[in-house]
Amino acid sequence: MGAVIVLIVILVILIILAIVFASSYNGFVKGRNLIQESWRQVDVELNRRYELLPNLVETVRAYAAHERNTLEDVTRLRNQAASLSQSDGALPSQQRAEVESALSGAVRNLIVSVEAYPDLKSNQNFLELQRQLAETEDRIANGRRYYNANVRNYNTKVESLPSNLVANLFHFEKATYFEVNDPAVRQAPSVNFGEIAYRGDQPAQGGPTGPGQGQLPQQQSAPPFGAGQPQPGAGEWQQPGQPPQQPQYRDPGQV
């Protein structure tokens, strides 16, 4: 009888361990799939940036030929990143993360250098490309944060007990973060050149003129209490000191 109880206890323990291992294994599979899916969203936006940059470079070159070094850096890093995107697997490599970070910095420098070219800042083609690029950079930043959050949760399970036993047994390895190391590059180039192009030093003609800087608008002083207050229906101002007149009503039948 005692041997039967021991066997039952051992069987229950084995069942519990099997459930724990199966749950942990399924958690790793789910986490890995979530990382791959979140990376595909980032990769789509990165490829969108690859498509926008050649047009942006050509537009800037037509107005700012002196920015040759900056344009060459953007083109070189764009081609290198696009090449790595074809050779990488389902997840990004550390090399691609570094190249993409350098490309973001080069694009940021290019956008800043445009400040010296007023004609380019007012070019509609450039404004549209800049707007699309800024939106793409925002989506890349949002996707990167989501991807890195999934990687952090996954890597925590790989390193923690008892899930690390399952990770070692089934060869679940840590995923690579997709980070931007330069703090200045973490912000997308969102300079609004549309406002700069149409902003003049003088106020627009025909527009209302407001008070000067540091001055408050003049307010009309209110009349003394009881003096010069309009009465309903009277249509006239009452003299000070006189009681207010009551409106007179006539019979509609009387003319």
Image (tube, helix red, strand yellow):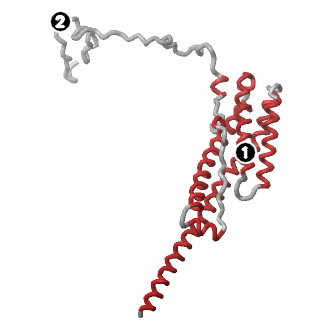
Q: Position of residue 92 (x, y in %)?
A: 71, 53
Which element carries disc 1, helix, strand or loop? helix
Up the image or down, 92 lies above or below 245; here it is below
Q: Which residue is mark 1?
A: 98
Q: Position of residue 220 (x, y in %)?
A: 36, 10
Which residue is most to the front? Answer: 2
Between 248 and 56, which is closer to the camera in this rendering? 56
Between 175 and 246, which is closer to the camera in this rendering? 175
Please give the name of the residue rendered at 66% of the width and 28% of the height, measured from the top-left corner.
Answer: 193
Q: Amino acid at mark 1?
A: Glu
- In the rendered structure, the answer to whether residue 234 lies left or right of residue 51 reads left
Q: Tell how many labels.
A: 2
Answer with mark 1 or mark 2, whichever residue precedes in sequence: 1
Distance in Å between CA atoms under marks 1 and 2 = 85 Å
Please give the name of the residue rendered at 48% of the width and 79% of the height, measured from the top-left corner.
Answer: 13
Please give the name of the residue rendered at 73% of the width and 53% of the height, measured from the top-left corner.
Answer: 93
Up the image or down, 124 lies above or below 147; here it is above
Q: Position of residue 86 (x, y in %)?
A: 79, 54
Q: Which residue is mark 2?
A: 241
Please give the name of the residue rendered at 22% of the width and 23% of the height, measured from the top-left corner.
Answer: 252
The quarter holding residue 243 reads: top left
Res 196 label: none
